[in-house]
Image: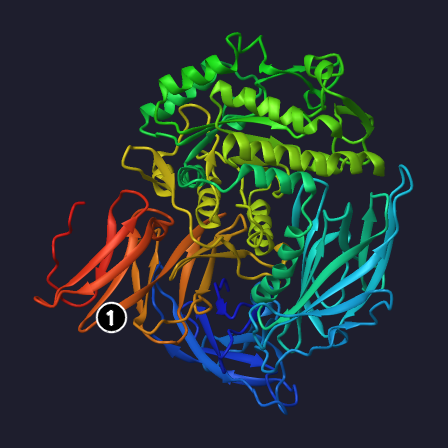
């Protein structure tokens, strides 16, 4: 018998009950042939398994074109008294098609494993770190930190341990045990899963890490979350978190400096994972700001505060819809290829804000028999073979053909190019050079690389960025950032890492107002599609606390995964770049991703808060779905992705959406982007809907607060037809006109479009001022 069964909370995954809820509400969706559904669970004082009968319900909203479905609901009152509180329970589903038919277990029908529900913590976290980590090394100095929020639910500690100095080419190393995580049931690690990319790792009970983590978070049986963050880049230290064969968490520290230094780690405990990360990151940011290099600190002082005009242009850079040449135009760039691509987009009505000229414009040298990844930079000017008129001539032609483009960025590697700098080129004749050995066993590892030495990095970037600025370039994309850590010897890393980071950042501030993209520093390759989005959504849990805008990378609008990628970019809160082959554009998809500025340029609608995963403790192999949540003031935008290549149906819960109702709000409206259907949700009960997904399909559901004025309820929906249309609304104010009792809504919009407002009760509308 083929049965499509959906369940909330989900089976085969862990569900963390929302704070302040005392009921676990179950919903099971089944075909109409099913007559009886039961939940089998161990949410009892003794842990014995018990049965919960569910009742057929007609109240579940149907916002999708799903027919012939029945829904059964029921609830368990959780045990919140300290003497009976159980923290975690498991459940499964059984059903039958008639009163006389045999019971069928869900695992036998579709293989679904038990679901797990974690009840929210009801107690204040301990101030003793040994309550969470067992057998911490005595060589680690543990210092309690004052929680910035003064929240009673937060506890923060700073841990430090000595790391010996480097001896010539050999770095100093140290390992210290944090012991085992106590009462851990699930964990998440953000690791360097290779030298260039960060990504998530997941597990249960015991930590088993094959790569060094920059952040660990574990969920305890009592509902508390413990977050551990390692600080790197200070005092020439690289600090990560690893594990041993016994599941103990270790601090691993590498010191490239000539003096011993302290590895530092922050630990925070809170009742939600995101709050615990935020609590740990506050002292991290303070510490990093207090330890800037003298060169960088002086450069910032010399740069001074950004003017209003510079700040506005930086905002326009973030918000501009961009085209990148990398995939769309291929490896052999030329002025005609670039201009033809812009003309193609212009004919389709796509007026870009930003153009990124990627790799293959520079003057390079390549030894015979070597791959293109070993090309070496030789001169500031564009290569004469394909750009005989030089870079400035190209920029001038671009602005002539596409005068609406505000920003033109060019690509270069952090060490010049993939293979560094050509020893016989013009650049090598002007600046002091350094040749270093690359580590073996990594991408492009082994052998020697030549680049500008520490003493001349500041002059190199200042000269190069002045050349670019004089040519009309407005921004840079600086690739191969991970190469900074490729040097095999400690003295080379000591000489290059901080010097290069300071030099390019200061030069980009001086000449481009901070308009810079750091590449090969965060995301995995886009060819992996669902894994790419899964990684970025988990990385964002940590990245949202840095002074950067996470970039989920470019994509093409005209292949089978285009909508999947476009949806992810729209809820990411970051920039959006396309890299289409000329003439191969999905204009409808571009329309959904962007909105027009008054001058016709296309802007992206970025949310106030970045998009990040909701299910942070569920691994990629454990789930078929990923939920990404972003907030824009009082609006919550949720994207749900089917990670599988087969059609699936899912009960999507939106009850976790924060923030809760404000004083003048009268519930919420939910809107599904794909269908435009609306659901009114007026109380604090479970908001849940069933949606169908095709292979690698996705849906966006937006939650809008409803404002109440006397007898009228109002919700502002933002720009309709846009995936993140709510993010077009920058400010909304209402007032009741005393003469007529009419309501006047004043909105500040980021872009033009079809504005959606829902007036839920009859109201005479006043014509808006066109200005």
Locate residue 476, reporting x and y percent: 54, 30
Name the foreground residue: 272 vs 770. Answer: 770
**Residue 164 location, x and y as percent?**
88, 51
Residue at the image point whose x is 47% and y is 68% from the top: 656
Residue 616 lies, with reference to residue 345, above or below; the image says below
As drawn, is 768 to the left or to the right of 448? left
State the residue at coordinates (57%, 73%).
Answer: 150
- Residue 516 horizontal/vertical position (percent): 54, 35
In the displayed structure image, the side of residue 159 where residue 220 appears, left or right: left
Give the vertical position of 557 relative to 288 (above or below).
above
Residue nearest the observer in this picture, 763 or 165: 165
| Image quadrant assignment for residue 257 | top right
Say what secondary structure mark 1 lies in: strand
Residue at (27% x, 36% y) in the render:
598
> Which residue in the structure is indicated by mark 1?
708
Q: How many marks?
A: 1
Residue 479 quadrant: top right
Please tell me whether residue 309 is drawn above or below residue 375 in the rendered image: below
Quadrant location of the C terminus in the rendered image: top left
Q: Is residue 314 visible?
A: yes
Is 521 situated left or right of 210 in this image?
left
* Spot occupied by residue 258 in the image (x, y as percentages of width and height): 86, 43
Question: Among all residues in the image, which is located at the extreme left?
Answer: 739
Q: Residues within 10 Å of mark 1 (few under 14, many from 20)?
A: some
Point 79% across, 25% down: residue: 434
The type of colouring in the image is rainbow
């Amino acid at each position: 018998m083929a049965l499509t069964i959906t369940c909330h909370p989900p089976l085969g995954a862990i569900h963390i009950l929302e704070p302040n809820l005392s009921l676990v509400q179950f919903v099971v969706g089944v075909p109409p042939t099913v007559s009886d559904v039961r939940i089998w669970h161990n949410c009892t004082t003794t842990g014995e398994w018990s049965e919960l009968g569910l009742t057929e319900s007609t109240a579940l909203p149907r916002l999708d074109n799903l027919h012939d479905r029945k829904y059964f609901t029921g609830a368990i009152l959780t045990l919140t008294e300290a003497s009976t509180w159980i923290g975690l329970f498991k459940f499964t589903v059984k059903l039958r098609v008639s009163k006389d038919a045999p019971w069928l277990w869900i695992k036998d029908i579709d293989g679904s494993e038990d679901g797990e529900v974690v009840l929210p913590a009801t107690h204040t976290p301990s101030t003793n770190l040994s309550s969470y980590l067992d057998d911490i090394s005595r060589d680690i100095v543990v210092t309690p930190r004052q929680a910035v929020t003064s929240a009673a639910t937060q506890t923060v500690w700073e841990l430090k341990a000595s790391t010996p100095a480097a001896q010539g080419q050999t770095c100093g190393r140290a390992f210290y045990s944090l012991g085992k995580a106590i009462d851990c049931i699930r964990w998440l690690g953000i690791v360097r899963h290779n030298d260039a990319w960060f990504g998530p790792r997941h597990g249960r009970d015991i930590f088993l890490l094959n790569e060094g983590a920059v952040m660990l978070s574990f969920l305890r049986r009592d509902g508390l979350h413990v977050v551990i963050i390692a600080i790197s880049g200070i005092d020439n230290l690289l600090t990560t978190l690893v594990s041993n064969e016994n599941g103990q968490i270790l601090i691993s520290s590498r010191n490239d400096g000539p003096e011993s230094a302290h590895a530092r780690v922050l630990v925070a405990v809170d009742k939600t994972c995101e709050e615990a990360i935020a609590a740990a990151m506050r002292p991290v940011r303070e510490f990093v700001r207090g330890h800037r290099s003298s060169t960088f600190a002086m450069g910032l002082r010399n740069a001074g505060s950004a003017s209003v005009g510079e700040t506005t242009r930086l905002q326009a850079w973030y918000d501009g819809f961009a085209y990148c040449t990398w995939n769309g135009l291929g490896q052999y760039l030329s002025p005609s290829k670039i201009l033809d691509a812009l003309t193609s987009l212009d004919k389709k009505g796509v007026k870009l804000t930003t153009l990124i000229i990627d790799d293959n414009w520079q003057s390079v040298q390549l030894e015979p028999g070597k791959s293109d990844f070993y090309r070496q930079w030789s001169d500031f000017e564009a290569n004469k073979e394909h750009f005989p008129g030089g870079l400035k001539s190209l920029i001038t032609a671009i602005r002539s053909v596409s005068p609406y483009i505000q920003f033109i960025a060019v690509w270069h590697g952090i060490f010049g190019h993939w293979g560094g700098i050509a020893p016989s080129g013009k650049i090598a004749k002007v600046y002091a050079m350094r040749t270093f050995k690359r580590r073996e066993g990594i991408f492009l590892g082994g052998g020697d690389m030549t680049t500008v030495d520490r003493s001349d990095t500041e002059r190199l970037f200042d000269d190069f960025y002045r050349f670019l600025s004089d040519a009309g370039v407005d921004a840079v994309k600086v690739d191969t950032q991970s190469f900074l850590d490729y040097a095999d010897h400690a003295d080379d890393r000591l000489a290059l890492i901080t010097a290069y980071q300071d030099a390019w950042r200061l030069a980009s501030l001086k000449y481009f107002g901070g308009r810079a993209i750091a590449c090969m520093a965060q995301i995995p390759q886009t060819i992996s599609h669902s894994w790419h989005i899964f990684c970025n959504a988990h990385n964002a849990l940590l990245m949202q606390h840095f002074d950067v805008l996470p970039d989920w990378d470019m994509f093409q609008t005209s292949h089978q995964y285009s909508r999947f990628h476009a949806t992810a970019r729209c809820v990411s809160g970051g920039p959006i770049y396309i890299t289409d082959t000329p003439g191969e554009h999905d204009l409808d998809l571009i329309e959904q991703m962007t909105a027009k500025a008054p001058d016709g340029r296309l802007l992206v609608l970025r949310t106030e808060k970045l998009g990040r995963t909701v299910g942070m403790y569920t691994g990629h192999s454990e789930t078929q779905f990923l939920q990404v949540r972003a907030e824009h003031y009082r609006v919550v935008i949720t994207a749900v992705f089917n990670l599988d290549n087969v059609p699936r149906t899912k009960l999507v819960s939106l009850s976790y959406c924060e923030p809760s109702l404000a004083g003048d709000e009268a519930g919420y409206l939910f809107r599904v982007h794909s269908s435009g259907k609306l659901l009114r949700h007026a109380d604090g009960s479970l908001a849940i809907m069933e949606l169908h997904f095709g292979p690698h399909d996705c849906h966006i559901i937006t939650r809008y607060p409803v404002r109440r004025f006397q007898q009228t309820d109002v919700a502002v929906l933002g720009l309709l037809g846009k995936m993140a249309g709510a993010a077009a609304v920058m400010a909304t104010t209402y007032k009741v006109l005393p003469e007529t009792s009419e309501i006047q809504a004043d909105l500040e919009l980021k872009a033009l479009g079809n504005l959606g407002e829902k007036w839920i009760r009859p109201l005479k509308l006043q014509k808006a001022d066109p200005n």
